[in-house]
Amino acid sequence: MNMQQERAVLGVEFGSTRIKAVLLDENHQELASGDHDWENRLENGIWTYSMEDVWNGLQDAYRKLKEEVKARYGVTLTRLGAIGMSAMMHGYMPFNAEGELMVPFRTWRNTITAQASEALMELFQYPIPQRWSIAHLYQAILNKEPHVPDITFITTLEGYVHWKLTGKKVIGIGEASGMFPIDSATKQYNARMLDQFAAIPEVAACPWNIRDILPQILLAGDDAGCLTETGALLLDPSGDLQPGIPLCPPEGDAGTGMTATNSVAVRTGNVSAGTSVFAMIVLEKPLSRPHPEIDLVTTPSGEAVAMVHCNNCTSDINAWVHLFRELFESFGMEVKTNNLYETLFKAALAGDPNCGGLLSYNYFSGEHVTGLEEGRPLLVRKPDADFSLANFMRANLYSAVGALKTGLDILFKEEKVEVDRIYGHGGFFKTEKVGQKILAAAMNAPVSVMATAGEGGAYGIAILASYMLQKHEGETLEQFLNDRIFKEAACVTVEPDPVDVAGFDAYIDQYAKGLAIEKAAVEHLK
């Protein structure tokens, strides 16, 4: 197979547990990939990743991809058509005039900005989630943190990597909408809210203006700069990769998830379920009022999106799977991880629709949708509950999307939001139809998974890089995805089972009542 590297596009995503690099050809077929496992750390009460881990992980993932290209095609990568960088959404990275990160990267997982979030929501009359960059910045101001006066630039993880690769302080509009509220008409930061923020006395006392420290907003398809000589060596320390390669606007995993599932059009939606879980619904009209549980963000092209984001999804399931693997290993048995997940997920299908009286909370960290600042994973049952493997696994799968359902019920039942298509992607959907069946019950809507769903954000940002490179004059991102990416994509759809829907509703009713147990665990298990 021949490979024309000057037409290939590279997409990289810094996910919560894995950094993945994907190389696509001009027809958007995968040529090679590479990945690197990593994990966040809880340091001094802050969920973070070190910058050393960022660059070592990026270089390792790219090196593995490069080695695969050499092995499969006999080619050493020196040129590419375009590159895109994506990462877990939002968070806080403040830099000084020397370009130094002044505090450890504060990720989306932190729930330490409640005071700032509530104050800004009241000021703006607009939802400001705790993980948003502006909430972190204002909380740092309220806390009188010593780094605040020296801030010259704030950005998110993919914005930081993009800056170091290109020298450009830019961000895609989808990720920008989680840094500071966006005006849908201008597709820029909301001018009224910028003025309101700047006028807060504690903010006015700072030696900088908010307008000067935020990254420049770009839309999908815009030119976001080129790989510099320094940037090329950061990505490929061997020196083989040459500078001058164009990069597309860096986007968060929300925007790349929408792209990877063809969910950028009005009345479409997608659910990304992995370490965290979030649902994105592209709106046809504004919501009637602000809801603290609902984020208002945008597609990579700037269309308004209602988002329900939950900090916890599959981490507790992963912990239980690890425990089961330990059990097998104690008997001297080797079990492949993928087989173990598949077996346990399929076991859930035999469980009772209401999980037989079992109740699970998967909260490794706080959960703003349900009002928890910290998390304690819990499994609760009454003595007469039907404690079977099937019900145990079903309860864990329900729990993985339990907080998500709490937020989605606001959209569908209170705001009467309508969607034509829901696509699922992420690790929760890897076992055929199981995750879909659970989510269809939670949403009472059909859930589709495409063959490309497992690619996730790396694939999505590669497609955005391809759009920048290949788009025709006037061709929208929606048209590009429909006509050139997903026209013949294989897709499996699962319709909601009325029995499952009723069972999930019964489970979530008990889940809501049982939150007092979770809150007590947080209070007493220090």
Image: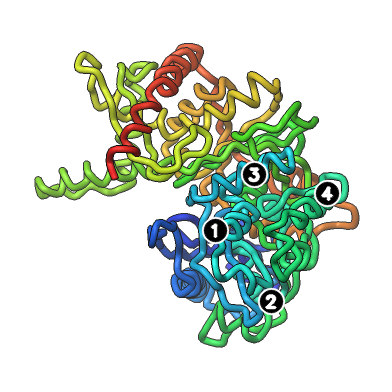
Q: Check residue 192 in the rendering and tell me which mark sits there, or answer none.
A: 4
Whole-percent x, y for residue 254 in the image: 62, 48
Q: Reply above or below: 310 against 334.
A: above
Q: Check residue 166 in the rendering and tell me which mark sits there, or answer none.
A: 2
Left or right of 520 on screen, residue 18? right
Asked which secondary structure carries label 2, the reply is helix
Point 51% across, 74% down: residue: 66
Whole-percent x, y for residue 512 in the image: 44, 23
Q: Check residue 143 in the rendering and tell me which mark sits there, or answer none.
A: 1
The kind of residue tagged 3 is Ala
Quarter containing the C terminus? top left
Circles 2 and 3 in contact, beta carbons < 8 Å? no
Q: Nearer the viewer, mark 1 or mark 4?
A: 1
- Residue at which label 3 appears: 119
Circles 1 and 4 in contact, beta carbons < 8 Å? no
Name the residue nearer the viewer: 353 or 349: 353
Identify the mark nearer the N-term, 1 or 3. Answer: 3
Whole-percent x, y for residue 368 in the image: 51, 38
Q: Could you tell me how far apart the alpha carbons at marks 3 and 4 are, in whole angstroms?
A: 16 Å
